[in-house]
Amino acid sequence: MRQAFIDTLHTLAKNDKKIILMNGDLGFSVLEDFIAAYPDRSYNMGVAEANMIGAAAGYSFEGYTVFVYSIVPFVTMRVFEQVRNDIGMQKANVKIVGVGSGFTYGQLGPTHHAVEDIALMRSIPNMTVVCPGDPAETREATKALVKMKGPAYLRIGKKGEPVVHKALTSFSLKQSILVRHGNDCALLATGNMVYAAVETAHNLKKHGIEAAVVSVPVVKPIDQKGITSICRKTGTVFTLEEHTVIGGLGSAVAELLLEQNIPVKHFYRFGVPDTFTYFAGSQEFIRRQYGLTPVQISRKILSILRSVSSRTTEDSALLRRSSQILRKR
Amino acid sequence: MDRKKIKKLNNIAVDVRKDIVTISSSANIYHIASALSPVELLVALYFHVMHIDPNNPRWSGRDRCVLSKGHGGAALFSVLYRRGFFSRKKLETFCQNGSTLPTHPMMQSAPGVEATTGSLGHGLPIGLGMAMALRHEKRKNNVFVILSDGECDEGSVWESALYAGYHALDNLVVCIDYNKIQSFGRTAEVLDLEPLADKFRAFRWHVQEIDGHDISAITKAMEMAKKSKGNPHCIIAHTVKGRGISYMEDQLEWHYKSPQGKLLDQALRELGIQYER
C-alpha cells in the first residue's frame, strides 16, 4: 500500500505543482524516488511532528495540497491537538498519511501499534478518514484525496498487502465497495482487514453461508446508503477492522444502524479488544491472539449464527490467551 | 521614522488599549493584561511595517502576521478594526453570544486573521509553513509571528526554531512579547527562559532585544529583520504586562480579571491622558 500511495502521488505531482510532501524523518525505501524527482517540494521536517503538522497547515494556506507522511502514532496521536486545531478547525488542505496501520509493526512493540487512530481522527470535524483495503484502493484514494480540498487522514499498511480488487472500476470517497455478493450476512471491513473478510467469506461458503463482503475504505463520512442497504438486506452484520473496537468502523456502523432503525438479528465487531498488546509478534501472530484470522472469524460467525456461544465467554478467552503470553515472558 | 508618524502610531496604541479595556469589560472577559502588552508590536506591524491591503485581505502579496499568543486576541481585533478590516460594530461583538470574535482568534473570525490560535505553541509552526511556501515561490513577503513568553515553554516552539534556524528561513520574524509574567507566576520563577537571546542564537537565529513599547525601536528592529538575510529573526520585545493602566501593570491577577465600575473609569481616564498632542 505504501508503494501504491507514493507511486500514485509521484505521478500526480508531475502535473500538479501544488503537491507538497513532508515527512517526519521517515520513508526509507519508500520516498526516495519522489524526493529525487521533486526535491523542491519534499521536506524532511525532522523528528518534530508537532511542528510538521502546524507547518503543513501554514503551507497549505498558501494554496498547496500538503501530504504529511509518518508512522500512524506519531502523526495522529502525538499531535492530536495540532491535527484538531491546525488542520481540522482551519479546514487546511492537508492529507495526513499514516503508515503501519494496526499491527503492521507488531514486532516493534505497543508504542508502534496503531489501533486507536481511526477513533481519534473520526472525532475531528471536517476530517475525512480513509483506510484503503488494498493497493488498488490506495491508488484510487490517493487520486481522490488530491482532488478533494480539505483535511483528510489516509491510513495505510506497509508493503506486500494482498490484492483484493483485480480491477477497481469505480471509486469515490462517498461510497463503500461491494466486493462479494451474499444474502446470509454482511461482512463490513476496512483497511487491511478487507482481504481477511474475503477469505472469511470463502470459509463460510464451505458451511453453506453466503456472506456479502463490503469494503469500507472511507470510515468518515461513512456511506450511509450503501451500508444501511446491505445491512437491511442481510439482517446480520459483522464489522472487521485492525483497530480497537472502540470508536472505529464497528462503532460507526453500530451508530448508523441504531439511529436509522435498521433491524439486525446479529451484530458483532471483530477488532482489537480494549487492551494494550504487551508482547511482540508478527502481524499474523497478534491477529491470532485477538481472533482476527479468517479461520477464527469464520468460527465465531458460525457460532453466532447458531447462537451457541455467548460473546462474553469468547472475548474473555481471547483476553486470557493474550495475558498468558505476557505471563510467559 | 519621523516624529509625526511616531506620535500618530503612539496615539493609535492608546486607542487600541481603550478598545481592549472597553470590549473586554463589556463582555466581562479577562486576559486584558496579556492583550495590553503587545499593542505597540501590533500597531507597528499593521500601520507601518507590513504590506497589507484591508480591502483585499487575502492579497497574495501581503505580509502575514500570526498572533500565536491567541490570548491577546482583543488587541489583534482592535488593530484590525482600526486598520479598516472590519467595522466598529463587529468589534463590539467581542465575546458576546454568537460572535465570531472569541477571546482567541479564529481564521473564521474576521478578514485579516491569518490563523486560529489560542492553544500555545501552534502559531509558530503555522507561520513557519507559510514562510516555507513563500520561499518556495521565491516571494519577498515576510511572516511575522507574535509569541508570548510563557508560550516558549512549549516544545513545538523549539521544534520550529530548530527547523527555521537550520533552513535559514530569513523571511520569518518572531516577536516575543516578553512581559515576564505567565499564567501562574513570573517566567523567572515558573520556568526561567534566560538566557533567551542566547537560546535563539544557538538555534541560528538573528536576535535583537528592544523596548517593546517604543514604536521607533520596534519599527527599526522589524525593518532590519526584513532587510537582513541568512537567518530567521527573533525580536525579543521587553514589555510590561497590563501596560498603560497603573493598577494592572506587572500584576499577575489582571490575567484573570475584568475591570468594572470605578476601576473601568480609572483605566479609561489614565489612557485618555496618554495621547500625545
Image (tube, coloured by chain):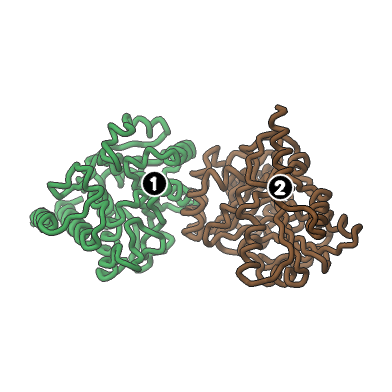
Chain colours: A brown, B green
Q: Quadrant of residue A239?
A: bottom right
Q: Which SS class for mark 2?
A: helix
Q: Which SS class for mark 1?
A: loop
Of the residues tagged 1 and 2, which is closer to the observer? 2
Compare residues A154 and A123 and report the one nearer the observer. Answer: A123
Across and down, in percent, residue B57 comes to 38, 64
Q: Residue at x 41, y 38 (%)?
A: B231
Across and down, in percent, residue A275 comes to 63, 42
Can residue A232 be seen from the camera position used here? yes
Q: Chain of mark 2?
A: A
Residue highlighted by disc 1: B120
Above or below, A292 against A198 in this view is: above
Compare residues A289 and B91 and report the one nearer the observer. Answer: A289
User: At label 2, which amino acid type do we have?
Assistant: Asp
Quadrant occupied by the C terminus of chain B: bottom left
Q: Residues within 10 Å of mark 1 (few under 14, many from 20)?
A: many
Residue highlighted by disc 2: A315
Instruction: Please state if A210 lies on the left or on the right of A103 as rendered.
Output: right
Q: Quadrant of residue A325?
A: top right
Q: Residue at x 84, y 54 (%)?
A: A199
